[in-house]
Amino acid sequence: MRQRPAFLFDLDGTLVDSVYQHVLSWKDALDAEGIALSVWRIHRKIGMSGGLFTNQLLREIGEEITEEKRERLRQAHAEAYQTHSRSVVPLPGARELLDTLTREKLAWAIATSGRMETAKHNLDRLGVDPEEVAVVTRDAVTYAKPEPDLFIAAAERLGVPIEGSMVIGDSIWDMLAAQRCRALGVGLLSGGYGGEELERAGAFRVYEDPAGMLDHLDEVGGRT
């Protein structure tokens, strides 16, 4: 019997409308360190691991990169996000999409480059209990996006091969990670990246948001 595809979802900007809350939280953290950086530069790096994120930002502006500074920024971001996350809501169609996959017995998991300390706020808004659903966070892997470790771990949690699974994300980092583990990338515009950017990074389908993907589920192996 042919294996039905598994759906491996990013979280921020893919299932919940939280990208700009993360941008503002990082801006608060950087401001607290006296680091002046435009918000658009921050946005372009949302979706990669926090460590790689801070490395790239600090390298761009010529700041010294120390483990102590990285940890201060990470903690300040997490603290700021507790406030900004109050406005986070599920993206249109997100709950309906997950409910449909569950009803049709199609395996799905969530793989996020955020740590559980920030991801838990978004999971709560989405109504997902990590005790009942396969959720892989940055805490569980050695390397986060654009490395494929998160999605590989999510496929392992589901007991399915990563090859041929669907990686659904809103950033180029998701699509690059999908290519590296030979999964199929599905891009969503709900995180602020353009369709052409996502396609260049490897997306074979691009939809506006989870609702758009749900409307075209048969195009990505969700035929029932």
Image (cartoon, rainbow, N blue to C red):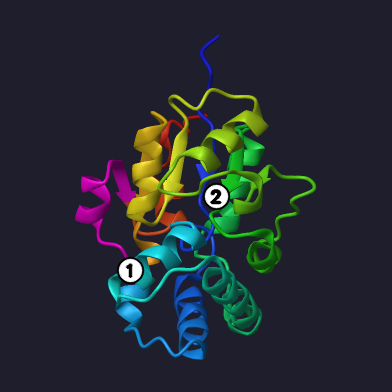
Amino acid at pointer 1? Arg
**What SS does tag 2 mark?**
helix
Amino acid at pointer 2? Leu
Q: Nearer the viewer, mark 1 or mark 2?
A: 1
In the image, is residue 6 part of the stretch drawn in magenta? Answer: no
* Relative height, residue 77 to residue 46 (above, below): below
Identity of the residue drawn at 50% across and 27% down: 162
Image spot of residue 210 (x, y percent): 46, 55
Image spot of residue 177 (x, y percent): 40, 42
Identity of the residue drawn at 54% across and 32% down: 6
**What SS does tag 1 mark?**
helix
Residue tagged 2: 97
Give the side of residue 181 with respect to residue 201, left or right.
right
Identity of the residue drawn at 68% across and 59% down: 116
Residue tagged 1: 59
Give the side of residue 179 with respect to residue 115, left or right.
left
Image: magenta residue range: 192-206
* Relative height, residue 220 to residue 197 (above, below): above
Q: Quadrant of residue 95 in the image? A: bottom right
Identity of the residue drawn at 40% across and 38% down: 178
Q: CA distance from mark 1 to mark 2?
A: 39 Å
Please tell me which residue lies in front, 122 or 221: 122
Sequence order check, earlier mark of 1 and 2:
1
Residue pushed farthest top?
1
Image spot of residue 139 (x, y percent): 65, 52
Please tell me which residue lies in front, 165 or 104: 165
Q: Quadrant of residue 23 in the image? A: bottom left
